[in-house]
Image (cartoon, rainbow, N blue to C red):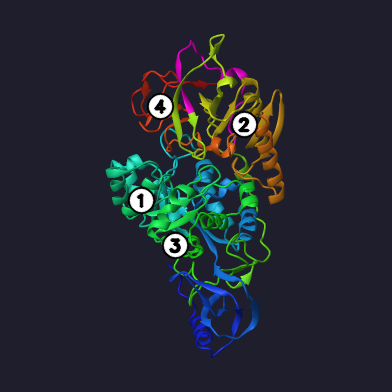
């Protein structure tokens, strides 16, 4: 709820609205979108003290000529993780503001997994001086499940502290959907903290979805099919259509907006790489693509402005109407949706201050040296469980394949697109390594890896020879985190991410250059799948079906059990839950 404003400001706005006083700024001659009626209006937009006073005929000290152009509210990203951009928040703001994104709602669970609530509070504080409006949701699931190993678990007390912060709107995506559905006391205690809760329910349907919605969760951005999307709308959930770098659901879900209209549907980017934003755009790119797919421009704009504000109860954002904040875009056309002018609180974007990086956020790597032998997988033959990539999705298939063996250990097979994958715990120095195999990258030589690996952000590396995998991990240790590509005995490209192993401390152009080099080097290894680094990052996420890997080993997400590499149905329970018969393949150094 917005804070009360001084009565003198309100009195001045009313005087401008009545025409008794001059506005600070008038936007004249443009076609103005009413998000409430989805029509284009003719008239001036009068702005005073950063707020819209009225639409009609007004005079002002300054005039913007918008003749022949379109005047719309600033774009709002309904759900994202700032850390996926690899940029400090000031550089992120510089990047997205030029595309018309004026507000975002962020779940900081990436940095929460690495630095705990201290890291989250630092990130919130770092956004205070930004012109970009950055709102937060308190990360509800750190760790995402008991199968992941963050620096430490966020407690109920931690969440209560975050929820008292200004600009923290509610609880972030409730990823432990099985716990919610079965009424686990720990999850219900979290839900009791807030009335506004984001959802995360991939593949959940029927009675389970009813239970999830009945818990008070208000949205989901994980729907990937029209059937899933329709069920969520019918259950009263807001449908947040995600168009990220790895998971792209717009084409599948957009028919629902054509069928039912734009009500209770909004856009989000979730996880976008920096070069994806720089080359393609941000929320404006989703609007552009939605219109190209046949959605009326008015509907697409409502889903990018008013609807996310309505969902998140940002009562004075998302519309050009009296009393709303003057976050305004002037668009030259309704095809590209790239603004000629961006106004924040009625003023052009000014100088964005640089964010200071304290030393303590740059010491997150607690990992001993590794050698090629640490990636050895003992194997005598037979069928093995293999993670299968699905193009354009972050869900995976659980495959079974024969693994070749040499000298009693399993090895990669490039002729069948089988690569080795490992996750190494990096927060507490346990020396734990989860080992497995993956199909779908197309990698033919070398290895690549990162400290950016949802959600616990341990080290993840994939490769076809153990020497290159060891080189990647050793270089990540030396950098204090980042992304590294190795071929043979050489590092081919790297992107240092010293801030929590997640963010660069360099300017945007440096990050973009290094990110492009890293992606080109990955392609040079033979990798053919789109957004391979984003795909890799999600292979360690224990709450996205079906087969994933953490530092504890292979995980069958659908069954909620650790599983052995061998395809026989031998399982263990969640760590600490009791059952320990035959374990997944892990290494302990």
Classify mark 3: residues with Cα within 10 Å, few (<14), some (14-19) or many (20+).
Answer: many
Marks 1 and 3 sit apart, C-alpha to C-alpha, by: 17 Å
**Start and end of the magenta stretch?**
365-387
Q: Is residue 582 magenta?
A: no
State the count of labels: 4
- Tell me if mark 2 has few (under 14), some (14-19) or many (20+) residues whose alpha carbon lies within 10 angstroms of its own: many
Mark 2–mark 1 Cα distance, whole angstroms, equals: 35 Å
Q: Which residue is mark 4?
A: 562
**Sequence-first disc among 2 and 1:** 1
Q: Which residue is mark 1?
A: 230
Residue behind mark 2 = 527
- Residue 90 visible here: yes
Q: Mark 1 or mark 4, which is nearer to you?
A: 1
Determine the image quadrant of residue 477: top right
Q: Does residue 28 appear left or right of residue 487 in this picture?
A: left
**In the rendered image, the vertical position of residue 447 relative to residue 377, given as above or below:** below
The mark that comes first in sequence, 1 or 4, is 1
Q: Counting other residues with Cα less than 10 Å from the Cα at mark 1, is it few (<14), some (14-19), or many (20 or more)?
A: some
Kindly identify the residue that appears in the image at 36 percent across and 27 percent down: 573
Q: CA distance from mark 2 to mark 3?
A: 38 Å
């Amino acid at each position: 709820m917005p804070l009360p404003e001084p009565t003198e400001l309100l009195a001045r706005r009313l005087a401008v609205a009545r025409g008794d006083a001059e506005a600070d700024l008038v936007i004249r001659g443009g076609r103005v979108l009413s998000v409430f009626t989805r029509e284009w209006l003719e008239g001036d937009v009068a702005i005073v003290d950063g707020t819209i006073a009225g639409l009609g005929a007004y005079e002002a000290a300054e005039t913007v000529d918008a003749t022949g152009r379109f005047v719309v509210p600033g774009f709002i990203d309904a759900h994202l993780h700032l850390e996926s951009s690899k940029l400090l928040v000031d550089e992120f703001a510089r990047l997205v503001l030029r595309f018309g994104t004026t507000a975002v709602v962020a779940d900081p669970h990436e940095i929460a997994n690495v630095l705990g609530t201290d890291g989250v509070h630092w990130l919130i504080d770092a956004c205070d001086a930004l012109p970009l409006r950055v709102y937060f949701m308190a990360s509800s699931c750190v760790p995402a499940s008991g199968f992941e190993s963050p620096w430490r678990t966020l407690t109920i007390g931690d969440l209560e502290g975050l929820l008292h912060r200004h600009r923290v709107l509610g609880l972030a995506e409730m990823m432990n959907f099985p716990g919610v559905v079965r009424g686990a006391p720990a999850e219900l205690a979290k839900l009791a903290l807030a009335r506004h809760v984001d959802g995360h329910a991939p593949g959940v349907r029927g009675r389970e979805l009813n239970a999830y919605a009945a818990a008070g969760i208000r949205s989901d951005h994980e729907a990937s099919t029209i059937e899933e999307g329709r069920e969520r709308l019918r259950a009263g959930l807001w449908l947040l259509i995600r168009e990220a770098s790895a998971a792209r659901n717009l084409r599948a879900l957009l028919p629902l907006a054509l069928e039912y209209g734009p009500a209770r549907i909004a856009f989000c980017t979730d996880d976008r790489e920096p070069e994806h934003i720089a080359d393609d755009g941000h929320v404006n790119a989703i609007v552009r693509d939605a219109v190209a797919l046949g959605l009326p421009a008015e509907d697409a704009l409502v889903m990018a402005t008013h609807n996310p504000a309505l969902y998140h109860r940002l009562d004075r954002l998302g519309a050009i109407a009296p009393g709303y904040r003057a976050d305004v875009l002037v668009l030259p056309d309704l095809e590209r949706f790239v603004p000629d002018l961006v106004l924040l609180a009625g003023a052009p974007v000014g100088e964005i201050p640089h964010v200071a990086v304290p030393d303590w956020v740059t010491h997150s790597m607690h990992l001993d040296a590794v050698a090629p032998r640490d990636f050895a997988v003992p194997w005598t033959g037979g069928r093995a469980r293999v993670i299968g990539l699905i193009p354009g999705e972050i869900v995976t298939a659980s495959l079974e394949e024969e693994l070749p063996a040499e000298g009693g250990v399993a090895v990669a097979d490039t002729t069948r697109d089988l690569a080795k994958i490992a996750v190494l715990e990096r927060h507490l120095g346990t020396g734990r390594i989860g080992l497995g195999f993956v199909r779908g990258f197309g990698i033919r030589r070398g290895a690549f890896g990162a400290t950016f690996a949802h959600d616990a952000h341990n080290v993840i590396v994939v490769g076809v020879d153990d020497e290159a995998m060891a080189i990647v991990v050793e270089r990540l240790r030396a950098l204090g985190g980042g992304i590294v590509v190795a071929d043979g005995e050489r590092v081919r490209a790297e992107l240092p991410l010293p801030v929590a192993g997640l963010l660069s401390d360099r300017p945007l152009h440096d990050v973009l250059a290094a990110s492009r080099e890293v992606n080109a080097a990955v392609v040079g290894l033979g990798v053919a799948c789109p957004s391979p680094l984003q795909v890799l990052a999600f292979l360690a996420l224990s709450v996205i079906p079906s087969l994933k890997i953490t530092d504890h080993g292979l995980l069958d997400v659908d069954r909620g059990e650790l599983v052995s590499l061998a395809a026989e149905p031998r399982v263990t329970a969640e760590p600490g839950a009791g059952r320990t018969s035959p374990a997944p393949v892990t290494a302990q150094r």
